[in-house]
Amino acid sequence: MSTSKELIEKINAGAYDSVLHELYGEAIAPQKERYANAIKHFVSLFGEQEGICVFSSPGRTEIGGNHVDHNHGKVLAGSVNLDVIAVAAKTEDSYARVHSDKFAPDHIDMNDQGKDENEIGHSSAMIRGIANRFDAKGYRRGGFCAYTTSNVPKGSGVSSSAAFEVLLCSILNFFYNEGKIPAIEIAKISQFAEREYFGKPCGLMDQAACALGGICEIDFADEENPRVSRVPFRFADSGYKLCLVAVGGDHSDLTDCYAALPQRMRDVAAFFGKPFLNEITLAQLWENLAAVRKATGDDAVLAALHFVEETERVPLEREALASGNFAEFLQLVTESGHSSYEYLQNVLVPKPGAEQGAAIALNLASTLLRGKGAWRIHGGGFGGTTQNFVPDELVPAFRTGIERVFGPGSCHILTIRPVGPVQVM
C-alpha cells in the first residue's frame, strides 16, 4: 500500500495519466498538481494514514428538461469535468472529519443524527443526513477523515452541493460497502440529505446526474425508481464546446422564486385531480384551458405548458444525439431555451431593480454566435447561469466577448465526463 510520498511520485511519473485523461480531457497537468497538493494538505491535517484513497465526484449540466424533475418529468443530463475531489482514509470510530478547502472543518459523530436548525445550509447537515439515510437503508457506515477541494463554482448551476453529497456517499460506499451501493441509490441518499437536513428543496436530477455519469435520459415518473437510459454520444467529436456562463447574480433571496415554479405546476395538476404534472397531456391542457386559467392563474398555465412540451422534447434530444444528428439537437435546445424564457419565466428576476445578467448573457450569446450553435438558461435560472453550445472556431471570440462583460473566469469551457464518482488512485 502506497505512502503519501509514493502516491505523489506515481502521479508525477504518469501512473494515473490515463484515468485523469478520462476525467478531464487533454489538460491533465494542472490536475496532477491539484491532486498532489490535496494529498499534501491531507497529511498536514491528519498525518500519514494507512489506506489513503483519492475520490472524485463530478458536477453536472442539465442538457434538457428545465425544471421538470420535481413534477416527475424527463431530463437529459450529463456529468462534467469540473469536480470535487477528496483524499480520505478510513478510521476506527464513528466520526466524519471533513476539512474542505476554504471552509470551516466538520467533525461530526455520525451516531448523532438529530436535525439542528443552526446547521441548515452547512455541510455538517449533509453529513448527518447521509448517515441517517445509510442507517435507514441498512447500509454500513463508519468513521473517516478527508480533505476535499473543489473546482465546481458555487452558484454556477453545476450543482456543487450535489457533487459534494455524492462524494461523501461514495467514500462511505467504498470504505464500508465494497462499492456495491447502486448509483441511483447514492443519488437518492444525497437528495434526502439536501432536502431534509441541509434545507434546500430540490428534485432528484442534480444528484442523479452527478452519480450516474456520462449523458443520461432520466424519467422521474416513479421517483423511487427512476428509469435511466444512457446516451451513446461522444460530445468531444461534435465540433462544439459546452460553455457555461456564470453571470454572478446573487441567489440568496430568490428561494421564493424557485419554490413558486413547482408549486404552479402542482396547482395545475391538482385541477385535474393529479399530484404531479407528468400525468397530464398537452391535449388535456388545451381542452380545459379556460377553466384552468380561472382556477390557477396564467403564470401556472404557462409553467404547465412549458412542463408538458419540455418533457416531450427530452426524448427527441436523446434520439438526435444517439443518431448523430447534432443540428437537430441544437434546434431542440434552442426551443427549450425559448420555452424557459417565455413560458416558465425563469430568466428574469421578478424583483424591482434586480440585476438581469442572465437575460443580458443570452442576448450577448445571440450576437456573438450569429445564429450558430444554441443558447439557453441553465438549471434553476433567475440570474445564475446560461448554457451555450459554441462551434469550436468561435470559442475564443465567444469567451472574450463574455468575459469582457461578466469578468475573467465567467465563461467555463467544459467537457462531458463519461463516468460518475470514482475512486481515482
Image (spheres, helix red, strand yellow):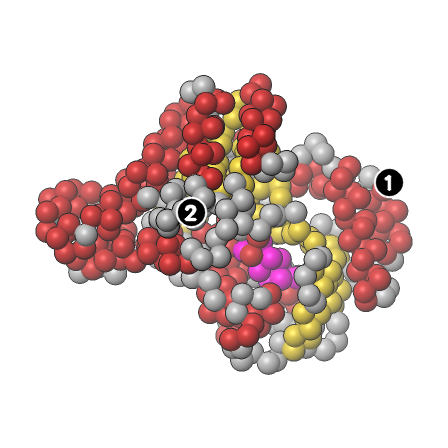
Residue 13 is marked as: 1
Identify whether 276 is placed above or below 126: above
Which secondary structure dominates the residues rendered in magenta? helix
Q: Position of residue 247 (x, y in %)?
A: 52, 41
Identify whether 7 is placed above or below 197: above
* Left or right of residue 33: residue 380: left
For label 2, the SS is loop
Residue 281 is marked as: none
Q: For the point 43% across and 29% down, which residue is it?
A: 363
Q: Position of residue 118 (x, y in %)?
A: 55, 74
Q: CA distance from mark 2 to mark 1?
A: 51 Å
Q: For the point 76% across and 46% down, which residue is it?
A: 34
* Left or right of residue 219: residue 241: right
Give the magenta part as a residue range: 162-171
Three-letter code, disc 2: Ala
Q: Nearer the viewer, residue 237 or 198?
A: 198
Give the image quarter of residue 243: top right
Q: Position of residue 282 (x, y in %)?
A: 20, 42
